Image (cartoon, rainbow, N blue to C red):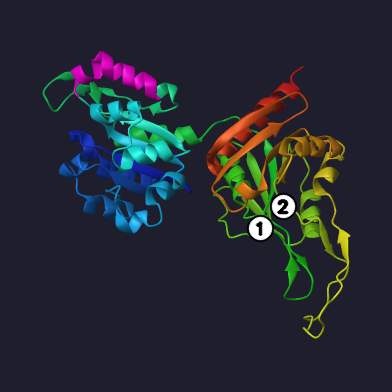
Amino acid sequence: MLSMANKRIILGITGGIAAYKCAELTREFVKAGADVKIVMTKSAEEFVTPLTLQALSGNKVHQNLLDLEAEAAMGHIELARWADLIIIAPATANFVARAAQGRAEDLLTTIILATPSAISVAPAMNREMWEDKQTQTNIEILKKRGFTILGPSSGPQACGDIGLGRMLEPELIVNSITRLFRTDILTGRKVVITGGPTREAIDPVRYISNHSSGKMAYALANEAVNSGAEVLLISGPVAETVPERVNCLKVTSAEEMLNSVLSNMQDVDIFIGVAAIADYRPAKTEQHKIKKTKNQIDLTLIKNPDIISQVSSLPNRPFVVGFAAETENIIKNGVEKLNNKKLDMLFANNATETFGSDVVSSTAISEDENIVIKPGKKSAVARHMLKIIANKLSTNQSP
């Protein structure tokens, strides 16, 4: 089975007889490495118990929109933002109709409207209901909204009919969902990514740094390795977990990051500079802690090396991608950075929305076009960024 390590999945269960398969579906997702949270409609509880699904997923099962404890922190919004992907299985004809109409009358339909994440639907219903013109119209509406439709399959049904309408088997659903996260667009490519902040020591206990969480770099590393690349992540100090199959070098200062980058540029196809490197560092690092004996101290700062510019200046340079987290004139400043640092591409975003957040939007800037990436989970945005990079790289290398 393909891996789904580090993926966050919401499994939405509606009230159809196929709901009994969701115990096995949950187990298969967990077995593949996913973190699974269950959202059940009221009618789904008639077919499978929340306690069973809680035991299999290891997480609380979510059932009610108006849950006082959860909604004190806007629980439905938190759930919507938490997921990398939402899969509704089984999706009854009633659910498909409500989703197509954009209704938000229970927890599951509300989460669907509030999520920036990808949504998949595994229909399960009687053959006649599936073939009904209104159901097919509803399915087309969901497709146009970007939903992925998985199935249905054909075979004997609980009502005695034979035909289309059966929910796909759990293993097929998991394999289909896993493939949504995996592509081959970077197969054979070697990618180096920098991420996180740097820390520039003032004395043994104090340093200059910034608010970068490293989440975007780690998301890119994870998606790049899932796209077939060999990935080296050079990371400043962050709390993120290194994705599976990603090689990682941990550094602290800008100079350490520069040395690690330049030492690992051989045969690199793509360099993605996401790290929020401190622009300046103290001219002198005190050997001992500075005592609080004066009302004022003077701290002389000197400029740190510009890592991405040095990579751009290398002979046989890779395809160089930069990031610009700006607070104003985002596109204008991004274009200037692209040109000044001789980058092949730059992703510009709003710094106030980016640091520490799981949801981000961005604009891909290159010499000949700008591509807007709509707000989404950093994992989904990372996949979109890599597709843009791969397409641009292929275009540049075409004869």
Structural crowding at the residue carrying mark 2, measured as other residues with C-alpha within 10 Å and reported as few (<14), some (14–19) or many (≥20): many
| Quarter-of-image position of residue 83 | top left
Does residue 250 lie above or below 261 as drawn?
below
Q: Nearer the viewer, mark 1 or mark 2?
A: 1
Q: Residues within 10 Å of mark 1 (few under 14, many from 20)?
A: few
Q: In the image, which disc is placed on residue 211?
A: 1
Q: At x 75% / y 76%, what residue is drawn? A: 204
Mark on residue 264? none
Residue 381 within the magenta-colored segment of the rendering: no
Residue 298 occupies quadrant: bottom right
Residue range of the region highlighted in magenta in the rendering: 126-142
Q: Position of residue 270 (x, y in %)?
A: 72, 37
Instruction: Say if mark 1 contacts mark 2, CB within 8 Å.
Output: yes
Q: Residue at x 67, y 48 (%)?
A: 351
Give the residue displayed 33% in from the left and 26% down from the top: 101
- Residue 112 location in percent, x, y? 38, 37
Q: Secondary structure at mark 1?
A: loop
| Residue 200 % position (x, y) | 77, 64
Q: Is residue 297 left or right of residue 114?
A: right
The front one of 173 and 354 is 354
Q: Residue furthest bottom?
A: 293
> Is residue 392 something one can see in this rendering?
yes
Cα distance, mark 1 to mark 2? 9 Å
